[in-house]
Image (spheres, rainbow, N blue to C red):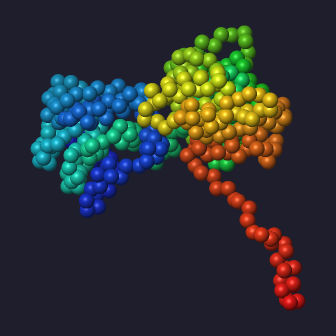
Amino acid sequence: MTRQAHAHAVPSMEDAGQLMPYSEGAETVNESLIKARPIPRISIQAFCEGNTTAEALQVAAEDRRLAKTHVSLHMGGAPAAVAHYQESPTPNLIVIESSLPRAQMLGELDKLAESCDSGTKVVIVGHVNDVILYRELLKRGVSEYLVAPVTPLQLMESISNLYNNPDSDPVGNVMAFVGAKGGVGSSTVCHNAAWTLSEVLKSNVVIADLDMAFGTTGLDFNQDPVQGIAEALGSPERLDEVLLDRLLTKCSNHLSIFAAPVVLDRDYDLSAEACTTVLDVVRQNVPFVAVDLPHTWTSWTKRILLSADEVVITAVPDLANLRNAKNIIDLLKQSRSNDGPPHLVLNMANMPKRPEISVKEFSQSLDLKPTAIIEFDVETFGQAANNGQMIEELNKKAKAVAAIHDLAMALAHRKEVRVEPKKSGMPNAFAPLLEKLKFKR
């Protein structure tokens, strides 16, 4: 925010007549979550006046979207910031809360500009809805002005907008699929949902198979790739757009797979940092990344689960699945307080002769309504797996197709319009005959 940086101000609020407070124009939670994309590895220093703003910043700092950032909080507002940066270098972003009168606030910012590096961005949290003040702040290179009180989601969205160009392609959504227990069909759900997204939305989707020793992505799509995700995880710092294209296996116009090696003559001691780096590169290149997680609990599976944009838990309706699903959901609630609940898929429901917990009791125990219920259909799923096909490719009329579509659209925050058959008493084909009968009368 130097005086030379005035021309680089980023106007983000309409200045027609009266300035609308940010809080009045806040989006719904889901829309805000979509807009608040992950923020790169930057340093953020905040100078607050009151506990409310400090607490909102603290909550935002603990969110997964700011996981790479370094955030430090100070009290004292604008005067404290001016004093601090007279002796210390400025970070990438400064957040200042100020309730000072217009002239005094601008005076403090002029003093701050004398110490600021040219690349430093400044966000002001003010207490007045003043369009003249807003214009003066923009002239001084302030990137954003928010009207208190602010919420963690508003802060995250504002910071995200500063470091993610709204004119560029958005960062892709990472969707983590995990089974509540081994053998519940999480991989099958992942592959079918990802395929459906690519076909219905005509958007590029990558499936990342992280079950290194026993992954089934290659089998399910009838592919035998020579290279895959193991090469990327081995040297994550080398992965770029060119290498990514070489390592991906294209299955259709919009779907590619990052296949697992599926060999047992090597150890797979993955690092959480390597997994994060690889997924970050993939999400920069495609709108959707479906991560097929193995049923193991390691530092990297936990990291991916907690940092994903969407989480899908697949379970079958029995007691062990109920216990494990509850443990996962409780962990997500504790660590992802600014995110919506995970998506629950009840798979292989209504299996003949098997005692099982009813869908109602299962969802009540978890306090979570299933996004999709897939009924037991061993013939269709078995044949599709043996053919290397998706369920809808094999049989468009299969019961599971509608449930998978519901899940895919929920993950993309879209609604699919289904054409219902007309409920007329008589088919249209009989209309001419009826007309003739009327004419005879």
Q: Residue at x 32, y 30 (%)?
A: 58
Q: Is residue 160 visible?
A: yes
Q: Quadrant of the C terminus?
A: bottom right
Say above or below: 402 vs 381.
below
**Left or right of 283 on screen, residue 347:** right
Q: Is residue 196 visible?
A: no
Residue 390 placed where, x, y %?
76, 38
Residue 236 placed where, x, y %?
55, 22
Circle count: 0
**Left or right of 260 on screen, residue 11:** left
Q: Quadrant of residue 141?
A: top left
**Left or right of 112 on screen, residue 300:** right
Viewer-side residue, 171 vs 293: 293
Q: Residue at x 61, y 40 (%)?
A: 371
Say above or below: 294 vs 387.
above
Q: Quadrant of the N terminus?
A: top left
Residue 373 placed where, x, y %?
68, 39
Q: Residue at x 55, y 19 (%)?
A: 300
Q: Quadrant of residue 343?
A: top right
Q: Residue at x 70, y 17 (%)?
A: 213
Residue 79 placed where, x, y %?
14, 34
